Amino acid sequence: MIKIIHPVAGTIATLTIATFWLSTALSELFASRSVVIAVKTTIPWGFLILVPALIAAGASGLALVNGRRAGLIGAKIKRMPFIAGNGILILIPSALFLAFKAEAAEFDSWFYAVQLLELAAGATNITLLGLNMRDGLRMKGWLRARPR
């Protein structure tokens, strides 16, 4: 069962973060202010999906490694503190701040500074989660390693 939970939860988490990121970027670039407000105030509700998915992916991943830390498993494990720290210290507080500012229609320099920080941190997490997904697919043999 854990072998099913881990990739499903990881995929849900990655797609959720990518959805937050794309929704933010596209609404800021192409949509009205009311759409930006809707996006920014909806994202914190997405934590109800994201946080359990991340917990399930992390816990099932640790259960699957059985103490091993070498190779691709080690690379995945080394990325996880950065992913978690980025989420807990930057992404969640930023999303809550931006939702608060958007709901008050306060689109000031603080809003846009935090928005840029959130987009950079989100892109970092999407990249790191994508690398973990790639390494997981390689470990399963579903993706061949590139020759060096």
Image (cartoon, rainbow, N blue to C red):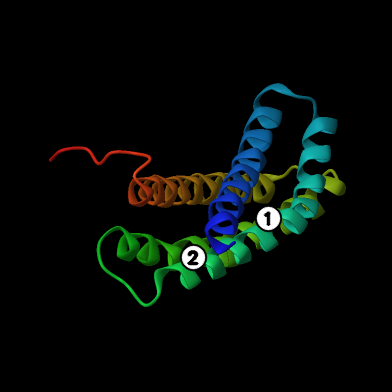
> What quarter of the picture does the C terminus occupy?
top left
Give the distance between the C-alpha atoms of the residues marked 1 and 2, in whole angstroms.
Answer: 16 Å
- In terms of image quadrants, where is residue 51? bottom right
- For this orientation, the residue located farthest to the front is 1
- Disc 1 secondary structure class: helix
**Residue 46 image offset from top left, x and y in percent:** 75, 51
Q: Residue at x 40, y 51 (%)?
A: 136
Q: Which quadrant: the N terminus?
A: bottom right
Give the residue at mark 2: 61
Instruction: Give the amino acid at mark 1.
Output: Leu
The one of 127 and 61 positioned closer to us in this rendering: 61
Q: Amino acid at mark 2?
A: Gly
Q: Which picture quadrant has residue 60?
A: bottom right
Q: Which residue is mark 1?
A: 50
- In this picture, residue 142 sits left or right of residue 60: left
Residue at 57% from the left image edge and 47% from the top image edge: 11
Locate residue 90 relative to residue 52 in the image: left or right. left
- When the figure is inspected, residue 97 is found, relative to residue 143, above or below; the finding is below
Note whether 90 is above or below 23 in the view shown. below
Q: Residues within 10 Å of mark 1 (few under 14, many from 20)?
A: many
CA neighbours of label 2 inside 10 A, class few (<14), some (14 to 19), many (20+): many
Of helix, strand and loop, which one carries label 2?
helix
Residue 141, how many percent across, how many down? 34, 44
- Identified at 65% across, 58% down, the residue is 53
Query: Can residue 106 be seen?
Result: no
